[in-house]
Image (tube, helix red, strand yellow):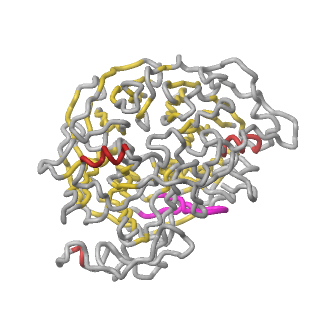
């Protein structure tokens, strides 16, 4: 978002309060970093100009000199990974640069990781997603020691803990006032302590709202959390209920009034995993710790009915092997199966009653171990195989959610790692090759391991991907990456000013169309529905954000659905690490990380409408 010259980012709900002394400078054009954090991975890299030959697997590229610290100049290309005739040494997507193909895009373009803050898992120094060669592959016993000394492994990749930039001290965010002092509408519900309509002085966030601006329907303040901070992952909207998880509790709100839909659910220990979306009948699942100690397991599984607040079954899920870590878990639902994903294993439970269905810990030959799971219409499993050997590679599988058996297996060449799943159905996977500083986005054919297309677009993309993919982090959950039955939609990177959203054909991998943000701020796709792409335009320091609808056919010109008030721009922009949704004409934004600030209660969630 655009900031006034020489000013730190506004806000502070979930942001650090004090600058880190002696921190390294940030790369230019990157999102704000918390003190003690490493630089963010930037947006996707450019491909060759339209009409020019595109690189294949491992094709050498020279990235712009203006990008320090990543996208290093490449050496001349080498023969394909197997040095034998076949698809990996032939012209085309896996070979040398005679035909278009994105394997060979410079890798200063892996998905951006949402900012992490003090107290986050692995803090200080949560590294960006992406990948470098993993020195722990084939040496699982070293992982324990590495975690103990502050190194992190993400998506099967080792990263050293490094320092972040010095942001400067944030001022306490407050609701700004318009020059027009005339308030319109009633004040939104102030929950006070996050438990409903609590006491305390009520703050009117609609004071000075201008004609044409949306109004704050309600806002919620976060529960008190330790000074080290706490996670607040999990936001769900279903029917008349919006629910939000934070620290050790789940609160529910009526979507129109903000009043409690059902009593707050409190857990004995902090929440450490949530399903990203509710089931068709409104069920969600959360995981919480089994104790207070730093090495407590994220093993307690609880089902919750969003409509009523009733608790369903609850049970512990144990680790299944020596190197099966469950400090955090990745929860996903496919049909009637809940997958509890961990670092090198996963346990499948039946959603209806919690019965254990199968354990997904390795392939039959014992050389491939899970590095992540994805759910939704399909259950997917990423595997890291042949660690430390000449045959080292990654694979992706579709699993039968009832039995765990593979429906198909997609093998990727050596050096290419499964980084994220942009969509499970259609299957769209982001891969990276840290050795070559390159990336790839591949779409597979329906119910098949065969490649349908590979993205070849002259652009750097910047979806926001939160959390690490190691120790239970999600392969899914990239804000700004979405699909429909024809296209993949990705936001471009813009260090300042407006960005664009690019529609990429799933059939060809080529650009179908693009449209520019209507404001001088970045625009992120949220969802595709009803022939339109719904997107969120970030706020600036003096203007609220917007929700826009972009027709997927015709002019592709964004149409404003909601224009959020200028008076709450500072609060809205203070959600550095965020979750957003637009449902039935209402826009919801919430934080996914609480800083533990002692300078007043943090904003947890806001709802806007007309």
Residue 473 seen from this side = yes
Front residue of 169/339: it is 169
Front residue of 376/300: it is 300
Is 529 on the left-hand or right-hand side of 197?
A: left
Q: Identify the image quadrant of the N terminus.
A: bottom right
Decide: is 143 above or below 280: below
**x and y percent of residue 453 in the render?**
34, 66
**x and y percent of residue 278 in the render?**
42, 33
Which residue is drawn at the image coordinates 76% and 34% (left, top)?
206
Decide: is 381 above or below 250: below
Is 237 on the left-hand or right-hand side of 609?
A: left
Which residue is drawn at the image coordinates 39% and 45% (left, top)?
474
Q: Is residue 417 magenta?
A: no
Is 113 on the left-hand or right-hand side of 221?
A: left
- Picture quarter containing residue 185? top right
Q: Is residue 491 magenta?
A: yes
Residue 555 seen from this side = no
Q: Identify the image quadrant of the C terminus.
A: top right
Which residue is drawn at the image coordinates 35% and 26% (left, top)?
300
Q: Which residues are the magenta region?
A: 489-505
Give the mark count. Answer: 0
């Amino acid at each position: 978002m655009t900031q006034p010259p020489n000013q730190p980012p506004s806000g502070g709900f979930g942001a650090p309060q004090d600058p880190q002394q002696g921190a390294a400078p940030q790369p230019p054009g990157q999102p704000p970093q918390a003190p003690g954090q490493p630089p963010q991975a930037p947006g996707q890299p450019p491909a060759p100009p339209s009409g020019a030959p595109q690189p294949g697997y491992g094709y050498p590229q020279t990235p712009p000199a203006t990008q320090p610290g990543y996208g290093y100049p490449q050496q001349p290309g080498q023969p394909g990974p197997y040095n034998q005739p076949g698809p990996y040494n032939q012209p085309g997507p896996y070979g040398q640069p005679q035909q278009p193909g994105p394997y060979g895009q410079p890798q200063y373009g892996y998905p951006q990781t949402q900012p992490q803050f003090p107290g986050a898992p692995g803090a200080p120094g949560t590294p960006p997603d992406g990948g470098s060669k993993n020195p722990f592959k084939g040496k699982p016993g070293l992982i324990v020691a590495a975690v103990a000394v502050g190194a992190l492994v993400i998506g099967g990749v080792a990263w050293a803990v490094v320092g972040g930039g010095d942001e400067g001290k944030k001022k306490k965010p407050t609701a700004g006032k318009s020059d027009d002092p005339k308030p319109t509408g009633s004040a939104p519900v102030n929950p006070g302590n996050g438990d409903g309509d609590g006491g305390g002085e009520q703050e009117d966030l609609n004071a000075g709202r201008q004609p044409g601006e949306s109004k704050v329907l309600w806002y919620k303040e976060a529960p008190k959390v330790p000074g080290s901070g706490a996670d607040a992952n999990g936001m769900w909207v279903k029917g008349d209920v919006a629910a939000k998880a934070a620290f050790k509790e789940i609160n529910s709100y009526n979507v129109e009034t903000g009043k409690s839909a059902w009593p707050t659910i409190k857990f004995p220990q902090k929440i450490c995993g949530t399903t990203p979306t509710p089931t068709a009948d409104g069920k969600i699942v959360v995981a919480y710790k089994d104790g207070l100690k730093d090495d407590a397991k994220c093993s307690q599984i609880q089902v919750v009915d969003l409509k009523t607040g009733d608790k369903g079954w609850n049970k512990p899920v144990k680790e299944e092997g020596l190197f099966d870590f469950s400090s955090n878990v990745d929860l996903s639902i496919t049909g009637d199966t809940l997958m509890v994903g961990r670092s090198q294993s996963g346990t499948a439970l039946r959603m209806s009653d919690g019965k254990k269905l199968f354990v997904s810990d390795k392939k039959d030959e014992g050389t491939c171990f899970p590095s992540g799971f994805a759910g939704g219409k399909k259950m997917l499993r990423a595997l890291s195989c042949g660690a430390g050997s000449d045959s080292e590679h990654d694979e992706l599988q579709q699993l039968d959610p009832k039995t765990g058996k593979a429906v198909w297996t997609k093998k990727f060449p050596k050096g290419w790692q499964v980084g994220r799943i942009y969509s499970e159905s259609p299957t769209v996977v982001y891969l990276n090759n840290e050795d070559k500083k390159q990336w790839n986005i591949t779409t597979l054919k329906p119910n098949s391991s065969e490649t349908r297309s590979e993205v070849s677009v002259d652009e750097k993309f910047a979806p926001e991907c939160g959390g690490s993919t190691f120790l239970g982090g999600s392969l899914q959950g990239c804000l700004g990456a979405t699909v429909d039955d024809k296209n993949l939609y990705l936001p471009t990177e813009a260090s300042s000013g407006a960005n664009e959203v690019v529609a990429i054909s799933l059939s060809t991998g080529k650009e179908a169309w693009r449209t520019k943000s209507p404001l001088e701020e970045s625009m992120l796709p949220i969802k595709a529905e009803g022939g339109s792409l719904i997107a969120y335009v970030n706020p600036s320091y003096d203007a609220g954000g917007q929700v826009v609808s972009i027709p997927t056919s015709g002019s592709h010109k964004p149409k404003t659905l909601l224009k959020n008030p200028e008076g709450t721009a500072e609060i809205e922009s203070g959600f550095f690490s965020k979750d957003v949704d637009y449902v039935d004409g209402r826009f919801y934004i919430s934080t996914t990380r609480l800083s533990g600030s002692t300078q007043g209660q943090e904003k947890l969630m806001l709802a806007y409408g007309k």
